[in-house]
Amino acid sequence: MSPHRSENATTLLIDSAELRSGPIATAALLAPIDKPYSFRVPESLAETLRPGMRIKVPFGRGDRTAEAFCVSISHGSWHSTLKPVLSLIDERPLLGDNMLELGDWIARYYACPLGRTLDMMVPAAAKNQVGWKRVRYARAIAEPSAPAAKLTRKRAVALNALRAAESDLRVDTWLAQTGCGAAVGRALEQAGLVCIETRLESVDPEPNPTPRVEPDFELNADQKTAVGQLSAAVDAAEFSVQVLFGVTGSGKTECYVRAIRRALERGRQAIMLVPEIALTTQTVQRLQARFERLAVVHSGLTGVQRSRTWAAIAAGTIPVVIGTRSAVFAPCPDLGIIIVDEEQETGYKNQAAPRFHSRDVAIKRGHLESVPVLLGSATPSLETWHNLQHRPHYRLIRLPHRVRNLAMPTVQLVDMRNEHRERRGVHLLSRAMEQQLTRVLQKKEQAVLLLNRRGFASFLHCPRCKTAITCPHCSVHMVLHATTELAHCHFCRARLVIPNRCQMAGCGGTLARFGIGVQRVEAELREKFPKARLRRLDSDTMNKTSDYAEALSAFERKEYDILVGTQMIAKGLDFPFVSFVGVVSADTALSINDFRAEERTFQLVLQVAGRSGRGDTGGQVVVQTFEADADPIRHAVQGDYEGFVQLELAKRHHARLPPVTRLVRILLSDPRISTLSKSAEALSQALAEAFTKYRISATVFDAQPSPIPRIRDRYRYEVLITFPTAKGLLSAIELFKAGGLLKTKCRSIVVDVDPVSLQ
Ligand code: ADP
Ligand code: ZN
């Protein structure tokens, strides 16, 4: 396209025939392209274009129109072939300077194109201004500059109506009431007698603020100290990471509430992140009860709600935001604090590009906006514990006791190997567990039972030929579900009718059911405690998120005696009548093929034990295991976080694994195994060579099939890389972005920086 075509020549400042000067916009295209491109800004747009707005630009062959984010504007000279910005998409910037910088960091750290990253930071509904309409208002100009010409009768009527009005009138109502057409309005505007402006208005009225119901607690001594430190951090308005390490039931939420309130008193806003809305209904409700103007940002919002909420947050009218991952991008104009509850949760990692970790983005945002970031947990991640020891901005705050001097629960470990030896028949529930349940039922208290595995039996196995039924599309065992009497694949959702006999050619052995699932626990409970009112809670019994909230509130009202479920019930719940928690098998998470298996096991057992004894009745816990000597189980039973972490950090040090190093996982997948393995091996070699060449310190591991080598008919290989420093990691990503290195014949290649799971 000729640079002159869409442009009228007078708008160009011509220095010479070739070189001109003026504003230049740097833009990140929404297409998956990593490089930023420059466009000159025509004079007609120079006044209105701001960084953070989306623009249309000519791009590629044939100069097709493409969308891009304007990321900066500079002044300089350009060559006459520089293409112009064609038009603006937004009237206002969608992202402020800090958010643009945050997006830039995410793109560079998590290896994602900038345009796509910026686009992801703003909800689609907010970009499209869903829920808003343009309304035109008219006002009579008090002292018109032009001499009053004689008006037609209609125009005079219309003008007088406007002059008599107490406030501006909507153009449509004004014209309808005076019996005039649009031409009259236009004529009056042209004559300089009337001013017409367009305003954005919401489609329906603002929702009512939630009433405040729950009173404040009188803080105990530990909470006072914690709140004192947090308030000082909010007042200081500088970057820090405050790690609130509080045992289960120590009253962390009350500290969050006070910290948020402090920020509001200073005229600022607060964001609180939770791992998953559905699983944190109690926390959300508690916050809702304390703050009148609070927005809950989650995936269940309609487009209108989302867009409206976003605008209210940006305007500062809703100063408290609570939400999952993407709430970290809430456009608070003057942020005072960011809180990350249960910071160790893997749900904070985004599992699509950009694969950012919300906790780490929160920390980066805190840094950019000079505000404190509060990380709360009873079991902080090893990353956070490591940072506490090595980074200057980290501060530890401890809440070592439960509120109201409640005792920590008493934990009993049951070695299931003995149980099997000393007892006839197969029992999922040990004698200790049965005794506790009997006690709870007699005293009309409540119990929570955890088994972190869905389904009934986790595999069907032929003892004769030693084969198990696996999914036809994935390399995983099929799980038998009692509800459907089918074998389910938990990865691709395939379902199979269960054969009676082994299907291997010439075998025909009788299939045996191994491995327990939560459905089988339910069955055994019903058999042993037929009178108990039982509720099972896992993703199979939950069709919508409201089912979960409904089940929990029924449990809270004591409509059930026993709640049995998967990890869904392990965390965050606070029920005063629960005096017993049973962990049916502490080993489920230990067997996963991931270097964090121990850490996850420890967290799970400690967290679920923490649900017990939150009322006045005291708390008992029984933990069943076949691996009674395993470190995470021993330490969790003793409630010894620091002992466990010390041991585990030493192991990670020795193995050069996170948090001591940074890990990047490159996952390749393809339906053709040979293409895949060759590509993966070539990649691993090319990476090692490139890092040597560019002196990037890294360890590149040999390509290998990933722990689940096939999902949905695609084979999977991975190349793992560890970097001793973040600097090395950033240089490597820069190298990836420069292109070439990651080109592959495989169907897909995914770069996952700081992966939280290696499945
Ligand atoms: P955590 O998140 O640390 O496990 P919670 O914040 O859920 O603990 O608090 C546990 C319980 O104690 C909640 O029911 C909460 O309302 C109550 N609580 C919090 N602070 C106090 C206090 N100072 N005095 C009495 N009860 C409190
Ligand atoms: Zn499958």
Image (tube, helix red, strand yellow):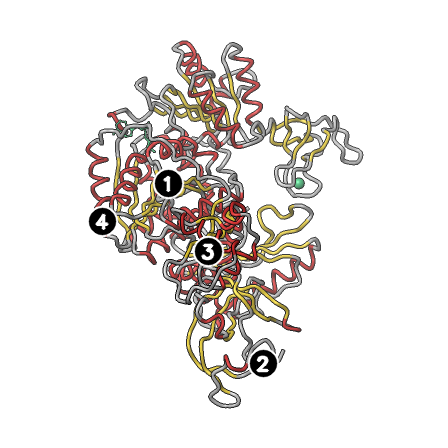
Residue ID for mark 1: 341
Residue 227 showing in the rendered view: yes
Is residue 553 toward the left or the right of residue 496 in the image?
left
> Which callout, 3 or 2, points at the residue further toward the start of the chain?
2
Disc 1, ligand 1: is the CB inside 8 Å?
A: yes
Helix, strand or loop at mark 1: strand
Residue ID for mark 3: 663
Please state the quadrant of the image where ligand 1 appears: top left
Question: Label 4 neighbourhood size at 10 Å, few (<14), some (14-19), many (20+)?
Answer: some
Q: How far apart are marks 3 and 2 (CA)?
A: 50 Å
- At label 4, the amino acid type is Asp
Dots 1, 2 in contact, CB < 8 A: no
> Which callout, 4 or 2, points at the residue further toward the start of the chain?
2
Residues 662 and 81: in front is: 81
Q: How far apart are marks 4 and 3 (CA)?
A: 36 Å
Disc 3, ligand 2: is the CB inside 8 Å?
A: no
Quarter holding the N terminus is bottom right
Dots 4, 3 in contact, CB < 8 A: no
